[in-house]
């Protein structure tokens, strides 16, 4: 079989064109003698440019799923490919560049670096990619302008409101134009107005830049905004 | 590299209190190390009894303080009868304690011609006394007297001029050396000599001479015979104990700097586990995170070391004459040596590096997701 034939077969297999391809994905933890099943038998694909939600009650495994997709945790069973990188067999030395080049994270509690101001926080992923300081700062400032925070660029996280911090976190997540942005309860710590503003911001990036988003939330009312819904219950997937 | 510089400078500005406390913690450990090690080094430098096993000491039995002993002329005669085949020289001594400037000083009197021979003194400066009213002193005594050559010292109400600085070969007590005849004139005949040194003749067996002396009824009835080095060691047990303490101090100070630096580094990294998790989540690799921590901890350790060194130097320099420590009348000179400083610097940086390496490895062994939950 020549390489063209092989390539054609790969293109035609299920999930071959998907950005995310999970097959029988599982994650178990050991807590003392007890084995805790966080995720079990998850099989799904996500297309590039999609705006998807993972929903389910607290503790159902939403965050664990996002951690696996983002390469900050590893599955204990099944296979997982994101942006062409097979994460279930990757080691830390290949996961770090994978995260750097393909993933943007938005966390519930923002996880901004407290010592850095807003523009420096946004510039960090670019600096991780080897950008020069000046170029990274210019690009980060542009992103802050896009999230309407140019006037707060020199402020540290502690000087920003929750909504502002989350917008800085979104700017940081998208600044490197990653393959996928994984947002873990991004509105969970915000009031309704700020939450909607943050959601609109992510939708805007998705529509303008065709950037893929997967958002974990327990707020079912937000799900109408997405093209795809992954319903998790007790670590298992019930697709809606 | 740009990220590392931005993070380091930002954290310095943002976290200056915590970083300052960390630097103070390291400085305290360095200060303790430098002082303890210097103390240990100084105590360890005190020599205990040179090996002068060719000399025998004849002294009254069961005497705790040699200045309380008396030596009868018949005992001296018994030893002299063994010359020249077994004994080459016999040197009776007058031995007293003096209190000068509130410090204990020994007075040792022996025949002038025996000083460089049987007593193994060496002349460090000046000359040996050659007339009445002249004495020589050791370096320790010079420190106590507050002067050396050409200074005056009052002994038993009489003034003497210091004409020579001598160094003993054995335990470095603070001593004033005086000619035996002058001491006899000074103290009178009542208490006589305290003990005598007997030099074994070349070619003679020390044990045979010792046995011969012990067999003599003029000696065995009242006196004991020791090899000089063993006798000195017996009388300087306290010095041996101090040397043991000195070694313990050195080990404790080394442990202090090793554990102190390591703990300060590890603790700091543990507190930053979540931040390091964020850095990893946004794409920084192991090497970058490790380098960032290494630069930060080395900077803090170096700053802590410099502050500790300055504090230790100021402490030692600011000690006045009244703070000086004396052991057996011998002044302890605390010198912060270059080798101690270099050792401290190497240990500080080495264990800061090791602390960073192990703590970073431990942290990076877990997933970024675990670090983010910290």
Image: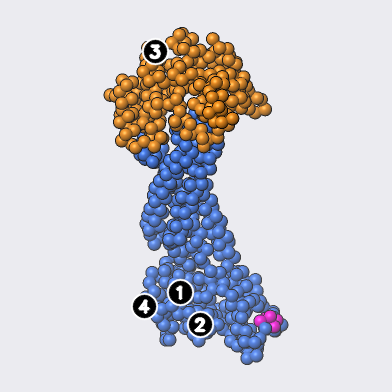
Q: CA distance from mark 4 to mark 2?
A: 20 Å
Question: On what subunit does the disc labeled 2 rest?
Answer: B
Q: Which is nearer the N-term, disc 2 or disc 1?
A: 2
Q: CA distance from mark 2 to mark 3?
A: 100 Å
Q: Which is nearer the N-term, disc 4 or disc 2?
A: 2
Disc 1 to disc 3: CB gap under 8 Å? no
Same chain under badges 2 and 1? The reply is yes
Q: Which residue is denoted by mark 1 in the rendering?
A: B138
The numbered mark at residue B113 is none
Disc 2 to disc 1: CB gap under 8 Å? no
Over which residues does the magenta segment extend? B206-211
The colour with which the image depicts chain B is: blue
Task: State which quarter of the image contains the N terminus of chain B.
Answer: top left
Q: CA distance from mark 4 to mark 1?
A: 14 Å
Disc 4 to disc 2: CB gap under 8 Å? no
**Magenta segment main secondary structure:** helix
What's the colour scheme?
by chain
């Amino acid at each position: 079989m020549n390489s063209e034939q092989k390539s054609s077969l790969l293109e035609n297999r299920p999930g071959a064109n998907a950005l995310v391809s999970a097959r029988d994905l599982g994650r178990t933890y050991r807590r003392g003698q007890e084995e805790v099943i966080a995720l079990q038998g998850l099989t799904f694909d996500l297309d590039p440019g999609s705006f998807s939600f993972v929903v389910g009650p607290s503790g159902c495994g939403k965050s664990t799923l996002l951690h696996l997709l983002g390469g900050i945790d590893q599955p204990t069973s099944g296979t997982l490919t994101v942006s062409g990188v097979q994460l279930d067999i990757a080691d830390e030395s290949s996961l770090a560049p994978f995260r750097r080049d393909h993933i943007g994270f938005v966390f519930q509690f923002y996880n901004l670096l407290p010592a850095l101001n807003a523009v420096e926080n946004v510039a960090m992923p670019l600096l991780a990619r080897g950008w020069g300081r000046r170029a990274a700062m210019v690009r980060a400032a542009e992103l802050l302008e896009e999230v309407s925070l140019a006037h707060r660029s020199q402020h540290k996280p502690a000087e920003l409101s929750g909504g502002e911090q989350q917008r800085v976190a979104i700017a940081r997540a998208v600044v490197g134009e990653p393959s996928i942005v994984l947002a873990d309860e991004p509105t969970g710590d915000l009031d309704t107005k700020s939450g909607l503003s943050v959601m609109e911001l992510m939708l805007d990036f998705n529509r303008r830049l065709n950037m893929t988003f997967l958002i974990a939330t327990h707020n079912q009312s937000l799900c109408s905004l997405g093209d795809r819904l992954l319903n998790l219950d007790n670590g298992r997937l019930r697709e809606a | 590299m740009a990220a590392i510089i931005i993070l380091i400078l930002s954290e310095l500005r943002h976290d200056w209190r915590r970083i300052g406390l960390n630097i103070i913690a390291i400085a305290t450990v360095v200060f303790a190390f430098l002082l303890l090690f210097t103390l240990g080094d100084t105590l360890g430098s005190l020599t205990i009894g040179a090996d002068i096993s060719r000399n025998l000491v004849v002294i009254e039995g069961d005497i705790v303080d040699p200045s309380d002993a008396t030596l009868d002329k018949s005992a001296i005669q018994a030893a002299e009868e063994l010359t020249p085949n077994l004994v080459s020289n016999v040197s009776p001594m007058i031995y007293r304690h003096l209190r000068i400037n509130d410090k204990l000083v020994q007075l040792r009197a022996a025949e002038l011609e025996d000083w460089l021979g049987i007593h193994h003194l060496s002349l460090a400066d000046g000359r040996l006394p050659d007339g009445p009213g002249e004495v020589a002193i050791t370096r320790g005594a010079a420190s106590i007297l507050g002067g050396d050559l050409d200074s005056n010292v009052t002994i038993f109400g009489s003034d003497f001029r210091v004409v020579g600085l001598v160094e003993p070969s054995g335990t470095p007590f603070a001593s004033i050396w005086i000619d035996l005849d002058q001491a006899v004139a000074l103290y009178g005949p009542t208490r006589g000599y305290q003990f005598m040194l007997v030099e074994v003749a070349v070619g003679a067996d020390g044990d045979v001479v010792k046995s011969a002396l012990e067999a003599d009824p003029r000696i065995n009835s009242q006196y004991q015979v020791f090899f000089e080095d063993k006798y000195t060691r017996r009388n300087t047990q306290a010095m041996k104990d101090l040397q043991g303490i000195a070694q313990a101090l050195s080990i404790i100070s080394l442990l202090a700097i090793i554990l102190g630096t390591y703990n300060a580094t590890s603790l700091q990294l543990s507190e930053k586990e979540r931040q390091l998790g964020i850095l990893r989540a946004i794409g920084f690799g192991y090497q970058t995170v490790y380098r960032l921590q290494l630069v930060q901890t080395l900077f803090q350790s170096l700053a802590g070391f410099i502050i500790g060194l300055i504090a230790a130097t100021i402490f030692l320099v600011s000690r006045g004459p009244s703070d000086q420590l004396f052991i057996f009348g011998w002044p302890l000179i605390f010198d912060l040596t270059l080798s101690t400083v270099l050792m401290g610097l190497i240990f500080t940086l080495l264990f800061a590096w090791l602390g960073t390496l192990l703590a970073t490895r431990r942290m990076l062994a877990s997933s970024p997701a675990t670090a983010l939950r910290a």
